[in-house]
Image (cartoon, helix red, strand yellow):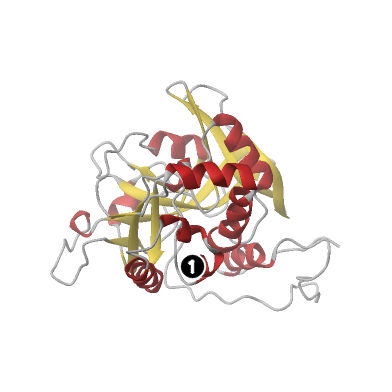
Amino acid sequence: MEPNSLKWVGSSCGLHGPYIFYKAFKFNRDGKLRILSLGDFFFVRCKAEDPICIAELQLLWEERTSKQLLSSSKLYFLPEDTPQGRTVTHGEHEVIAVSEKVIVRLEDLVKWTVPDSGWAHGLKAEPLKPSVLRELGTNGRREALHRYRESTLTSGLNFKDVQRERAQLGQEEDGRKVLVLSYPQYCRYRSVLARLSEQPSSLLIDHTVLALGGIAALGGATMILYCRDTFDNPTLLKNESICDEFGECGSTRVIPKNIKYQIPQKCNTGKTPPYNSPQSFDHVILVILTRFFAENGQCLHFPT
């Protein structure tokens, strides 16, 4: 990674004490600019001797006093790369999630990334024909499709500013080379593929098909996997890149597991979160942030 190449992309999406939350960041690695945003899945290697796994970017924030740029991600491993190994109960396209989220500095997350992973696992998404892709660019449906995906895959946040910068880099679909679904989502997707097996690929961008579980792979090389189980990964506890919960780096612990997520209806101030007010964030990102702080006994403060 080139020095000072880390930059936030798009506007901030929340505040909590000294923490400012963002939707995406940009970095330069090996002479190539790349953007990663919330909801993106990408390949990482936590240590040189570790197997390649998939990271799902879930939170991005800056600690204002120390100027630390931080991230929280969920990691997915192939069954054969877990302590229990692959068994007859595992599916061909299955991955297993680490039970704890990992928090690392952005500079370390960038070092973890594997640009050319050679990953060959998963179900290759049904590609759209070039004629359909060209039509998307001329009739405005590409932007509508992005909005739909934002509402379903990226928590409903408005990523228009991020998508605009992605387009300028020619990297609109870079974050979709791999996609991890829940098991029910995966089953619905396979069902949609079976029903449309004899139909034109243009139906994959139909909003009814998308609502039923279809996935439109604009990049043409997206690998689909699913996750239905978690495991404990003790090697992460020994990884020096892992930070403490809210940016006090240097600790080798991750967020504690087995904590029930409960979204508080009121903050300590007695105010009900103004989900429907013009000043509030999108409802779903509020859910994500509130869960994140609730597990640490804290409350997210809302703008008034």
Q: Position of residue 71 (x, y in %)?
A: 53, 47
The local crowd at label 1, few if under 14, some if 14 to 19, many if 20 or more residues have their Cα within 10 Å, is: some
Left or right of 220, for residue 9: right
Label 1, on which residue?
Answer: 209
Left or right of 170, for residue 271: right
Q: Residue at x 81, y 74 (%)?
A: 271
Q: Is residue 50 above or below residue 72?
A: above
Q: Residue furthest left?
A: 88
Q: Position of residue 23 (x, y in %)?
A: 62, 48
**Residue 277 sits in which quadrant?**
bottom right
Q: Position of residue 152 (x, y in %)?
A: 55, 63
- Which of 58 and 68 lies nearest the eye of the viewer? 58
Q: Residue at x 66, y 76 (%)?
A: 264
**Residue 185 sits in which quadrant?**
bottom left
Question: Is residue 114 among the parts visible in the rendering?
Answer: yes
Left or right of 24, for residue 251: left
User: Tag 1, which secondary structure?
Assistant: helix
